[in-house]
Image: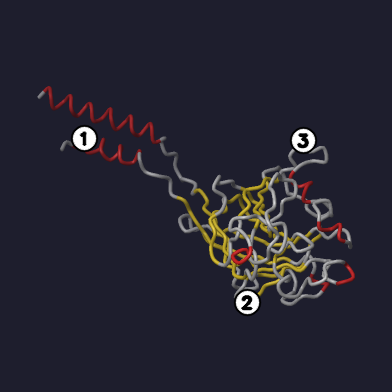
Amino acid sequence: MSRILKTAVVLAALAGSQAVLASATYNFTSTGSASTTCDSFTTSCYGNTRSYTATESVSGSAISMTVKAYSNTGTASSAATNANAVLQDAYLGYYSGGGLGITNRDQASSAGDTYENTAPEHAIDNNQRYDMALLSFSKSVTLSALSIGYAPYDSDLSVWAYVGTGTPVLDGATYADLLSSASGLVSSGWIVVGNYADVGTGSEAINASKVSSSYWLIGAYNPAGTAASCGSNSSTKSATGTAGDLDCGDDYMKLLSVSIADQSTPTTEVPEPGTLLLTGLALAGVAANRKFRK
């Protein structure tokens, strides 16, 4: 085979190759770098954060991530269960073997969330209040999977991403506000990436549309501001409900890890696959023509 023809074959092969994706996983198997010493719950720890760092497998670059807890606890009454109760920061707890859980500000019985901070409501749950964890990355990333380390009952969850400009503000907003303005006509920057039913302990692939963002919300299933409907409100779906239903309550989980699949940035400009293919075919034609003339 001539040198030109060999080159054509190589270029044609390159045309069919896929871009390499750099991946990294953040494991919540430690307390992380905490903003304050809050390894056990006290009311002074509301608004604490935990930070983690992971390294992309291809580029070798480190991406830091900070987690903070939120819940719609702006009113100390049963009205706080709906989408119109304002968001306040909460306590982000670390639980060995399970991962990250949330204790909201209505944890006292007098505030309306009777069993908060006791099992299973020390998890990320939607019983009486909707708990969600805000994940803030040092760069825009594409979440690809998550894992749950604790799911004693039902385990439906929601994943939202921020696609607006600037830094999102959660304190004082409502879940409905995050997805639309007061008029309901203009996006406030958050989108629903997906609602996932009956995740259970273990890993779950998410974000099939490959949304990329620096800010993500992960929490117990939250239908606020969406057209999503709720199924039966059973606490043990495998025994009493239909698998795949999204319930509006009785979901409890601790977040054990999240994974990203981030496009590696090439150091030099690479021709489009179509250009490579055409170049390869052209070279192959030149080689054939030269052989025929001989």
In the rendered image, residue 85, in percent from the top left (x then y), is placed at: 84, 54
CA distance separating discs 2 and 1: 60 Å
Residue located 30% across and 41% down the image? 13
The residue identified by callout 2 is: 96
Query: Which numbered marker is on residue 5?
Result: 1
The residue identified by callout 3 is: 185
Q: Earlier in the sequence, mark 3 or mark 1?
A: 1
Q: Earlier in the sequence, mark 2 or mark 3?
A: 2
Query: By what rule are the colours in the image chosen?
Result: secondary structure
Callout 2–callout 3 Cβ contact below 8 Å: no
10 Å neighbourhood of mark 3: few (<14), some, or many (≥20)?
few
In this view, the mark in front (2 or 1): 2
Tag 3: amino acid: Leu
Q: Secondary structure at mark 3?
A: loop
Residue 169, compared with residue 117, is above or below; it is above
Tag 2: amino acid: Ser
Residue located 78% across and 53% down the image? 170
Callout 2–callout 1 Cβ contact below 8 Å: no
Q: Secondary structure at mark 1?
A: helix
Residue located 58% across and 51% down the image? 141
